[in-house]
Image (cartoon, helix red, strand yellow):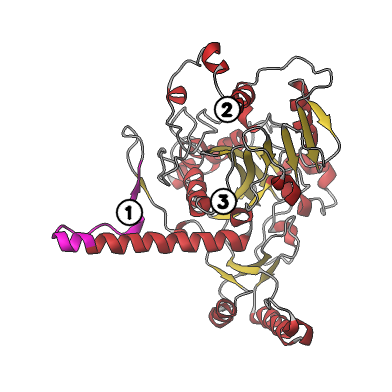
Amino acid sequence: MAGFRRTRPRMPGLAHERSMGSSRAEGLLCPLSQQDQDAEPPDDNAVAARPRAALLDRHLLRGEKQAPSTGGGPFFYIGGTNGASLISSYCKSKGWQRIQDRRREDYTLKWCEVKSRDSYCSFREGDQLLYQLPNNKLLTTKTGLLNALREYSRVTNKTHKAALCAQAKSGKDATPAPQEFTRTSPEHLGPQRVLKMEEFFPETYRLDIKDEREAFFTLFDETQMWICKPSAANQGKGIFLLRNQEEVAALQAKTQSVEDDPIYRKMPCRAPQARVVQRYIQNPLLLDGKKFDVRSYLLIACAMPYMVFFGHGYARLTLSLYDPHSKDLSGHLTNQFMQKKNPLYALLKDDTVWSMDHLNHYINDKFRKAKGLPQDWVFTTFTYLPCSRSYACGGTGEILGVAQKQMQQIMAHCFLAVKSKLECKLGYFDLIGCDFLIDENFKVPLRCPRAVGASRQGHLYTP
């Protein structure tokens, strides 16, 4: 670590102000419009002829500052505290005015941590911006994402079988396996292999589905650790480890006691609390002996048509040294809520957050030669997307994209798994935090994405 300067965390700009089209923070998918393909922006006359929604889009993306308003707006509303000062200061710098009444419907931008049915009912498509897609839980909860990935895998396999039958009838050679299928990509970048779910998603079972939990209880053995998580909780709440048969038996008995409860039996929709058990990654890559993960961001900047961007974020470290046998969860979970329980947190807070540059320098110094990694592995393989453009997803369901590397490829796969089911209107947008582990073999498993506004733990607090 000698010779490396620790970068103090700082607050970023809004997602579209950050260099997401640069070599270190890129868009996932590519817009096809001529405007996006041209190097120069359109002239003002052409812009003036556009509809109101396009004018708003241009205003936001190009960051042109409005003259201070004397009371006629534009107005913005913020509900909650996570990122509130950041969003408020940005909007005010554009001359926008903050309103405090959540019932007002004359806003231009509404950002709320908690979704409200009224907000979606009164939303004016094309005229307003509303944070959070109504059913983003398909992507941001553990059971939602698990179901989506499983279904996406089944569809891929079905497509593969159909292609096999078609080629058998035509007498052509057999088609490649599903994981060898490719997505449409720009010619200069080449096709992209479709991921297999098991390549990035640890083995997982749902405890609220009887067949799945019985399968887990049957297969468990003490050579592996498992981690049990509530489907939609955050801040590490409700998480515990399963290390031995006694702990699994206790979980099984608790689940059974809930099912045997007379009150539970009278419930119209009988099911235990939505939880998953997931195979625990026991061999994480360590930074100075500490466990870490990487918080990255998926920005759904537009939902009609979809335009999705990627931001690589920062690394989050534990304060205590990693011990797989420790019962202290603060050594297993990297989030700030858990680290605050450490009595030294106030003194060592900055040690729990590394910039991606810091992480890259460390891996170059400690692991590049020993593991045979390329120079700057973090940016050339882990997060890098070799293109300077932003990327958008067309309405056909095809990826009109680029050779994504690891994090981008995984996030694009997850987005495509839910894309057809997401509720979309012009003006909906979402910012989703995605957490990735790196194991000692430099494989990259995904931890569940979550809506940034779902927690008060500073998810907008990045180096």
Q: Position of residue 319 (x, y in %)?
A: 74, 50
Reading the image, the residue beneath label 3 is 422
Q: Distance between the residues labelled 1 and 2?
A: 32 Å
Q: Which is more toward the observer, 338 or 409?
A: 409
Percent x, y of residue 335? 72, 51
Q: Identify the residue at horizontal 73%, vertical 85% (top origin).
A: 265
**Left or right of residue 108, residue 24 in this image:** left
N-terminal of the pair, mark 1 or mark 3, is 1
Residue 322 visible in rendering = yes
| Type of amino acid at the residue the image marks with label 1 | Glu
Q: In this view, does 207 lie above or below 123?
A: below
In the rendered view, tell whether residue 453 sits above or below residue 151: above
Which of 43 and 237 lies nearest the eye of the viewer?
43
* SS for dot 1: helix
Asked whether, in this view, residue 268 is left or right of residue 368, the answer is: right
Read off the magenta span: 166-184
The residue identified by callout 2 is 19
Neighbours of disc 2 within 10 Å: few (<14), some (14-19), many (20+): some
Q: What element carries label 3?
A: loop
Which is closer to the viewer, label 1 or label 3?
A: 3
